[in-house]
Image (tube, grey):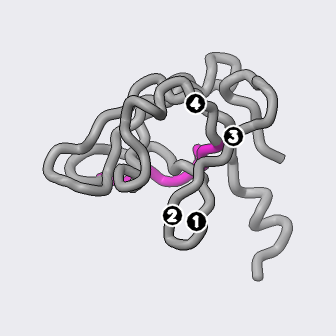
Amino acid sequence: MITIEDFGKLEIKIGKILSSERVEGTEKLLRLEVDFGSESGIGTRQIVSGIAQFYNPEELVGKLCPFLVNLEPRMLKGIESQGMLVAASVAGNCVLLHPDTDVPAGTPIK
């Protein structure tokens, strides 16, 4: 169990995937360029996500998804990941989450 204060430390924002490509030499990793909007103070970030088994890179471009943006950067296969895609896991499959209406990139999840 975590406290509401712990939960409040998570900064989750909607990002728009601008580009997506497989990480060479891996079966699971995709490198995403994600726009969080200039108004958010974040701009564009590179995020590496282990969803290549479930999605082709080209089908992700243009999608709005939630991302954890205040996670400490981490090197994955020599590529810096500057956040984490938030998705559901259903019966071992990855399911992307999307807003049910168009929202600006950088919109916070509360």
Q: Are marks 1 and 3 in contact (CB under 8 Å)?
A: no
The label number, if any, that marks residue 89 in the structure image: 1
N-term-proximal mark, 3 vs 4:
4
Q: Do callouts 3 and 4 mark residues in contact (Cβ within 8 Å)?
A: yes
Q: Earlier in the sequence, mark 4 or mark 1?
A: 4
Residue type at mark 3? His
Q: Between marks 1 and 3, how big is the CA–CA gap?
A: 14 Å
For residue 93, which numbered disc appears in the image?
2
Residue 103 shown left or right of residue 81 in the figure: right
Magenta-colored span: 66-75
C-alpha distance separating marks 3 and 4: 8 Å
Identify the residue at image location x=45%, y=43%. 82
Q: Which residue is mark 3?
A: 98
Q: CA distance from mark 3 to mark 2?
A: 16 Å
Whole-angstrom CA distance, mark 2 to mark 1, is 5 Å
The residue wearing badge 4 is 63
Q: Residue at x 51, y 50 (%)?
A: 84
Residue density around tag 1, few if under 14, some if 14–19, many if 20 or more, within 10 Å: few
> How far, Cα to Cα, is label 2 from label 4?
18 Å
